[in-house]
Amino acid sequence: MHPDELLSSYDYRLPKEQIAQHPLAERSASRLMVVRRGENGVEHRRFMELPELLQAGDLLVLNETRVIPARLEGVRAATGGKWEGLFLGVTSTGDWRLMGQTRGKLQPGEEIRLHPVHAANGGDRDDQCVVRADSFSLTLVEKEADGVWRARPT
């Protein structure tokens, strides 16, 4: 099997309205997918219900991957137009890799002024990536494949 074929098996449609934009205040209220193999059924429950759902002999699969809260909001310096982005990582040169959307077409050299962001829980958790600054900007350097931009923090 070709690696691309294996990767494509994980591709699925996810409606935008089902993607959480902010973490839940009560983490135990997060959604839980229950797969009933013998019945070929799937149930959507809440994580707080897990103790009631488990029975002797059940298999519990833990997914320990993490999603960093890295949503960015700002404005285009040249136009004042709203800009939203998603931080993907840092390159070896210190540039940021991100995806961004706005009305109109972004151009290399364009400046994005980020809004100060504060975590919903006050930023006390150590797994939060929060930009706290009165003024923080990114300069778009280069557009890569699949709509990913390389940007330089300024």
Image (tube, grey):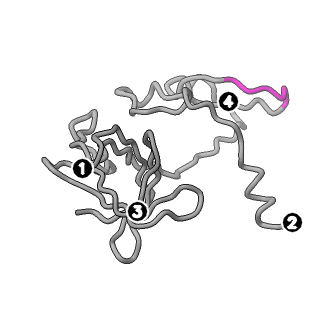
Q: CA distance from mark 4 to mark 1?
A: 36 Å
Tell me the SS state at disc 1. Answer: loop
Q: Residue at x 43, y 48 (%)?
A: 86
Q: CA distance from mark 4 to mark 2?
A: 29 Å
* Residue occupying the far bottom of the picture: 93
Residue 84: quadrant of the picture: top left
Identity of the amino acid at label 1?
Val
According to the picture, the residue beneath numbered tag 2 turns out to be 1
Relative to 140, is 86 above or below?
A: above
Identity of the amino acid at label 4?
Val
Q: Which residues are magenta?
A: 38-43
According to the picture, the residue beneath numbered tag 4 turns out to be 34
Task: Select label 1 or label 3 by which is in front.
Answer: 3
Q: Which mark is residue 108?
A: 3
**Quadrant (top left, top right, bottom left, bottom right) of the C terminus:** bottom left
Q: Earlier in the sequence, mark 2 or mark 3?
A: 2
